[in-house]
Image (spheres, helix red, strand yellow):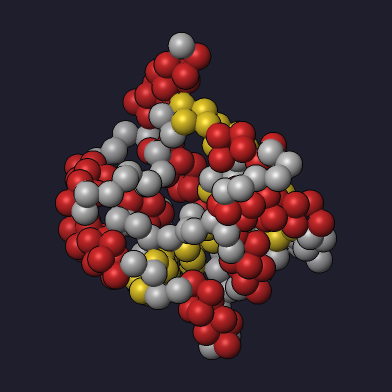
Amino acid sequence: MENQIFEKVDNYIIDLFATEDDALLQTRNSIELLGIMQQSISPIQGKFLQTMMMACNAKRVLELGTFVGYSAIWMAKALPQNGKLISIDFDIKVASLAQKNIEATGLFEKVELKVGKALEILPELIAEKVEPFDMIFIDADKPPYKEYFKYALELSRPGTIIIIDNVIRSGKVLDENPSDERVVGVKRLNQYLTECKEVTAIILQSSGIKDHDGMAVVVVNRS
């Protein structure tokens, strides 16, 4: 019963602030072509990412976990004309669908898709000494979340916003000895965020159309 209320409130917020256009609707529905579970963020989370991009005047954005391109489209829509989004996914089948979805929006010139393991691609970006990113969104496989975050820090600047999805796992992070490696991964990250002196962090808990979960919102400290 309570979750029904949360879902209704989510839909109320979506109607007010996060209405999906045809491109976003088609992208979200395209997952049916692959026959796998829906894993895209919600429209509210998409609008939240846009809002955070505006807060840090984001021109360069990095995303770990493209999936079918839904979150990438939300973020690409908020980029300035000279903005750039680099999005990484290890699954070539999913990334191919994401590319088609992004091309259909006319935003593909702002988006660069990289297919491969993020733990291999991120060190390459660091070695290339790419320009720091203004915002980084992490929504990939959970066991190496801490490692992803540490690489993200190296690709950041003071004031960069780093957002990490799925860090509550329906409250399973409260388990002292979880058997699920995804829960273990996010717990490692959450603990690390409390110890990392380079950032200021908080977790925002949520419940609604995406069930019970949360996002970590992190800002790289200014010296």
Count the marks: 0
In the current view of this chain or complex, which residue is farthest to the bottom? 128
Q: Quadrant of residue 101?
A: bottom left
Residue drawn where x is 49% and y is 72% of the image: 118
Q: Nearer the viewer, residue 53 or 29?
A: 29
Q: Nearer the viewer, residue 90 or 208?
A: 90
* Above or below, comparing residue 128 to residue 220 in the picture: below
Q: Quadrant of residue 14?
A: top left
Image coordinates of residue 119 in percent, x first then y, are 53, 74
Q: Is residue 165 found left or right of 89 in the rendered image?
A: right
- Image quadrant where one finds the C terminus: bottom right
* Above or below, comparing residue 131 to residue 95 in the picture: below
Residue drawn where x is 61% and y is 38% of the image: 172
Image coordinates of residue 121 in percent, x first then y, are 48, 78
Q: Quadrant of residue 168?
A: top right
* Above or below, comparing residue 146 to residue 212 in the picture: below
Q: Is residue 108 found left or right of 191 in the rendered image?
A: left
Image coordinates of residue 89 in percent, x first then y, are 39, 67
Is there any visible trace of residue 107 in the rendered image?
no
Residue drawn where x is 73% and y is 41% of the image: 176
In the current view of this chain or complex, which residue is farthest to the top? 1
Q: Nearer the viewer, residue 100 or 222?
A: 100
Image coordinates of residue 222 in percent, x first then y, are 76, 62
Is there any visible trace of residue 213 in the rendered image?
yes
Residue drawn where x is 58% and y is 54% of the image: 181
